[in-house]
Amino acid sequence: MKKLADLSVIFLIYVLAYGIGYAACFMIDNVILMMFVFDVAATFVTFCFSIVLHNSSVYDAYWSLTPMVISIWLFIYLQAFSAWQILFLAVFNIWSLRLTVNWIVVFTDFSYEDWRYKKYREEHGRFVWFILNFFGIHYMPTFIVFAGMLPLFQIALHGMNALSLIGMAIILLGTALEFFADRQMHAFLEQSKNATQKTVCRVGLWNYSRHPNYLGEITVWWGVYLVMLPFALQYWYFVAGAVAVTVLFNVVSIPLMEKRQLSRRPDYKEYKKATSRLLVLPHKKQRTD
C-alpha cells in the first residue's frame, strides 16, 4: 500500500507537470519549440517536487514516460494518422511503456532513491549538489532525450517509406535487449539476495556484455534516427540525439556503474577483463582474433 500511495503521488506530480508544461507552450506556433518548452517546463516542476520530497528519483520515470506523452500529442497535433505513422508510434511507445513499467517494478516507495543521487548528495555541498541535481540529473537527460526525439517531427510531418522498417526493427531489437537484460538481472538479484558475498551476474545476455541494458537503450535511439533517415536525408544532423545518448552511457553511466561494481563485487575485475563492455560478443577467452 505504501508503494501504491507513493506511486500515485509521483503520477499526480507528472500530471501537474504536464499541465503546467502545456500552459507554458500552447500559444507557441512552431511545433518543435512548443514541445521543447513543454518538456522544459514539465521538467522544472518535477525538479521542484524532487527538492520538496528530498528524493531526485521523482524524476526517474519522467524521462521514459514523457516521450510517450510528447509523441502521442505530436502525432495528434499534426494529424499524423497514416498506417506507417501509427505503426511507428506503436513501436516507439512499446519501448517507452516497457521502460516505465520496469521502473515501477524496481521502485519501492519514497525511501528508494537511485544510488548515484545519494552518492552525489553525500560527496558535495549544498550548492554543488543543487547544480548537479538541476542540470545533471534533471535537465541533461531531458535535453538529450528531446534531441533523440527530433526525428519524430519529420516522421509526423512526412510519414515514412519501406526502408523505415529497418529502423523500426532496430527499435524493437533495442527494446527486446533491455527487456531480457532487465528480467535476467531481476531474477539474478532475487536468487542471490541472501548470499553472503555479492557476485557478478553472468546470466543470459550478461555473460556476453557487461551492460546489455545500456546497449538496448542506445540501440533504440539509433533506430529512431534510422526510421527518419531514408526519407529526410537533409536532416542527417538529427543524428546528434543518438550520438548524445551513446556518449552519455559510455562517458557517464558505464564508468560510474563499473566503479561501483568493482568496489562491491570481488569477481567483477575478472568479469570485466573477460566480457565485452557493451556489445553482445563471445567471451574473450573464446575469441580466435
Image (cartoon, helix red, strand yellow):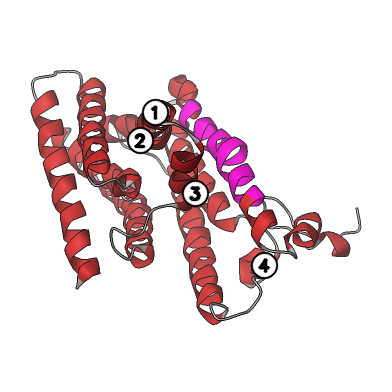
User: Which residue lies under the disc numbered 1?
Assistant: 135
Q: Nearer the viewer, mark 1 or mark 3?
A: 1
Residue under the image location 63 percent in, 66 percent down: 205
Left or right of residue 140, residue 204 in this image? right
Q: Which residues are magenta?
A: 240-259
Question: Looking at this view, is 104 or 51 the one in front?
Answer: 51
What kind of residue is marked 3? Glu
Determine if residue 163 is in view.
no
Within-10-Å neighbours for mark 1: few <14, some 14–19, many 20+: some
Q: Secondary structure at mark 3?
A: helix
User: Which comes sooner in the sequence, label 4 or label 1?
Assistant: 1
Q: Which image quarter holds the N terminus? A: bottom left
Q: Secondary structure at mark 2?
A: helix
Question: Looking at this view, is 255 or 113 the one in front?
Answer: 113
User: Which residue lies under the disc numbered 4?
Assistant: 200
User: Which comes sooner in the sequence, label 2 or label 3?
Assistant: 2
Rounded to the nearest whole Å, what is the CA distance between mark 3 and mark 4? 21 Å
What kind of residue is marked 4? Val
User: Which residue lies under the disc numbered 3?
Assistant: 217
Is 271 colored magenta in this rendering? no
Q: Secondary structure at mark 4?
A: loop
Q: Which mark is residue 211?
A: none
